[in-house]
Image (tube, rainbow, N blue to C red):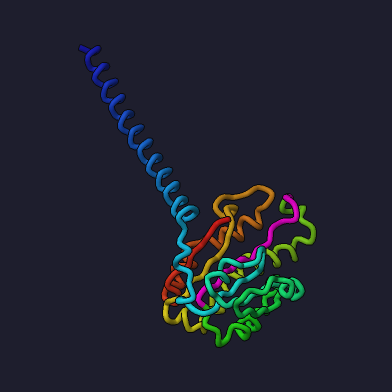
Amino acid sequence: MNSLKVDDMLLMTETLFFWVGTFTVASLSLWVLHRLLQGFRIWVLGNGQLLSPKLGKWAGILRLLAPPSQLAGKGFAMMLISRSQDKLDDVEQYKVETRTIAVDFGLSDIYPKIEAGLAGLEIGVLVNNVGISYPYPEYFLHIPDLDNFITNMINVNMTSVCQVRVLSFLEPFYESKGVVLNISSASGMYPVPLLTVYSSSKARATHRPLYTDTHHAVRRIQHTCL
């Protein structure tokens, strides 16, 4: 009799663990499938068809890493914003109207100059590619000139993203037509040893409430981790 009770209890326990395991494996499989489909949609299919001069005549590029030929090829007039005017002058001139603004995103008082340069332009796409990292991985307390390093990192990686007031006067965004592309980093998704300040600043850039708070002014804010 006791043997039967023990067998019944073992059977119940096995059944419980079987369904718990099944649920766990199914959940993980669905999560992995979702991430794969999401990556396929973003990186393979893409949504570049959304970006056209119908959103607005001008495309603003904050900080150049490579010539923005794709947006120019779509017919956007180009507003290029970066630190060095010499580098801006060296950028290939496209068969579209091009203007430049030279500012250092490590400073916090540059945004009135950007607003003045963008005033009156019908900005349809604004690409925020601003960002800096460590010159080399280092322990937090061993970073040279730590105070200035932190201030510069915050100004470049966080203030530039939070300065949505730069867009507040742009007519296409009033009309809920504009698109903002904030280029971030996968380092913001998980803590990164020896790059803690950079990782933290990029985590702020990926913080979803920042985008939901501005949905009333901008129809679509697309965030990309690179």
The residue lying toward the viewer, choosing from 211 and 150, is 211
Give the residues drawn in magenta, as a range: 124-138
- Give me the residue at 45% from left, 76% from top: 54
The residue lying toward the viewer, choosing from 166 and 96, is 96
The residue lying toward the viewer, choosing from 45 and 136, is 45
| Picture layout, residue 136 above or below residue 70 | above
Q: Is residue 128 magenta?
A: yes
Q: Is residue 50 magenta?
A: no
Residue 156 in the image, given as x and y percentages of width and height: 66, 67
Residue 43 in the image, given as x and y percentages of width and height: 50, 54
Residue 186 in the image, given as x and y percentages of width and height: 57, 53
- Give me the residue at 61% from left, 61% from top: 201
Q: Residue furthest bottom?
A: 120
Direction from residue 54 to residue 153 in the image, left or right: right
- Give me the residue at 56% from left, 62% from top: 204
- Quadrant of the image containing the N terminus: top left
- Quadrant of the image containing the C terminus: bottom right
Direction from residue 122 to residue 94 in the image, left or right: right
Q: Main secondary structure of the magenta part?
A: loop
The residue lying toward the viewer, choosing from 200 and 156, is 156
Direction from residue 202 to residue 132 in the image, left or right: right
- Give me the residue at 75% from left, 66% from top: 148
Residue 58 quadrant: bottom right
Q: Residue furthest right?
A: 144
Residue 83 quadrant: bottom right
